[in-house]
Amino acid sequence: MIKRLFTRVFGGKAGKHPAGRSRVIPFSKHHVSRDGISYAARRVTDGLQAAGYSAFVVGGAVRDLLLDRHPKDFDVATNATPEEVRRVFRRSRIIGRRFRLVHVMFGEETVEVSTFRRMVDAEEAETDEHGRLLRDNEFGDQEQDAARRDFTANALFYDPATQEIYDYHDGYADIRANTLRMIGDPQVRYREDPVRMLRAVRLSSKLGMTLDRATAAPIGRLKGLLDNVPQARLLDEMLKMLLSGHAVEGVKKLRAMGLHQGLLPMLDVILEQPLGEKFIMLALKNTDQRIREDKPTSPAFLFAALLWHEVLAAWKARQEAGERPIPALHSAMDDVLDRQREQLAIPRRYDAVMKDVWASQPRLEQRSGQRPYRMLEFPRFRAAYDFLLLRCESGEIAAELGLWWDEFQNASDARRAEMLQPETGGGPKKRRRRRKKKPAAEEAEPAGE
């Protein structure tokens, strides 16, 4: 205990905060209190500092606190190696192979702890022919760690012990000016990792910040570099944007900057169709609203909405070619999902939900006999019904159908019976009962006497 207290007060193992070329912003200026940091993050920084290491809350959490937003999670950066962090905290585990991190658990909260890393020099950097970094995982110091981060607003280090912020790239001033600015030469940074172009759009939309002119300028010229990014990373970034609570702004900005092409068919084609654009924007607006109200959202439902008009077009084409409606719909669904996977690999675990929502739409248009009752028992009725309402609101189908289902699902048995429409086409054909054949002995004419 005495040794830990000594190292915490006087420093040890590089425990003193290496300000370097940073600007230290005191609490009296930024007003971000230690109380705004989660209990687990405080325990992690306190524990590492007590063991003689530097430790800071970093990245989006500091940025959000300065913007008076509630951070979704708190990440910590330290000069301790993953093995050293693991020795300090019993309930922790090292994850990752190429980029090792430590997850430290306190109750239900998990804090992600990373070791300071440095920018790889151009001579030793491993890149592809387009300049994308293939290896970037070298330990460094705090100043180097700040330089390798993407935007100045994400390169701030907050010390809960002193309530000071360490700022190497004027990120504090940029946040106050409501500006999102890339650290270093934007063109080089985009070549290193083209996903930064999508992050620039997502963060500026989410935070309501203006993209710095120099940060935005190369995007139009370099957007083709996204073709070389693994699909899993593109999907992850798209999901973050679509589920950010600001998807409407994000999609509009993607479109304005020409980044929408090649990611999802809805961004390529649907936004050029008035009816399709209205449907998509309603779906995104609905998702944004649910996220802001802290209600659950489903990526599968959202992808079903984004691809619906592609399914409709393929379905119509197959019917015009002579296929029967229901088999044509199922074939259209498979066609669209297969085509989409060539551009952005939507995980197959979403397929069942998407197909159920799509396949239920013709069933919701049937309001006679036992069909509506069976539809109410459908496990994904709520999702199918919400999807139907989007179609009604966008003008794709008559609003009266949505109103009918709204009443039917909450009506009494007597009222439901009154609401049913008469069967069309004479109703289901009754099976003719086959007369049993009599035994041969009984069918024969009686022998003459």
Image (spheres, rainbow, N blue to C red):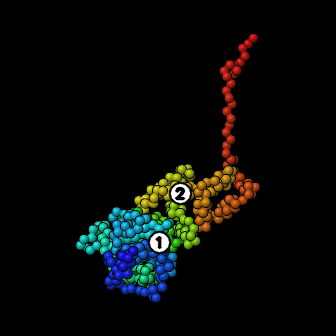
Secondary structure beneath label 1: helix
Give the percent coordinates (x, y) of residue 444: 69, 19
> Please, what is the three-letter code of the amino acid marked with disc 1?
Ala
Q: In the image, is residue 318 above or below residue 233?
A: above
> Please, what is the three-letter code of the amino acid marked with disc 2?
Val
Q: Nearer the viewer, mark 2 or mark 1?
A: 1
Q: In the image, is residue 361 above or below residue 225?
A: above
Q: Quadrant of the C terminus?
A: top right
Name the foreground residue: 144 vs 366.
144
Q: Residues within 10 Å of mark 1 (few under 14, many from 20)?
A: some
Q: Quadrant of the N terminus?
A: bottom left
Q: Is residue 213 visible?
A: no
Residue 87 figure quarter: bottom left
Q: In the image, is residue 4 above or below residue 233?
A: below
Give the percent coordinates (x, y) of residue 55: 39, 76
The residue located at (50%, 79%) in the rendering is 35
The residue located at (61%, 67%) in the rendering is 393
The residue located at (48%, 54%) in the rendering is 334
Mark 2 and mark 1 lie on one chain; the one further toward the N terminus is 1
Task: Give the residue at the far top of this rendering.
Answer: 449
Name the foreground residue: 292 vs 95.
95
Q: Measure the alpha-carbon separation of dots 2 and 1.
A: 36 Å
Give the labeled residue for mark 1: 40
Name the foreground residue: 431 vs 111.
111
Q: Is residue 195 left or right of residue 291?
A: left
Secondary structure beneath label 2: helix
Q: Residues within 10 Å of mark 2 (few under 14, many from 20)?
A: many
Residue 218 figure quarter: bottom left
Give the labeled residue for mark 2: 353
Residue 431 figure quarter: top right
Give the percent coordinates (x, y) of residue 432: 68, 37
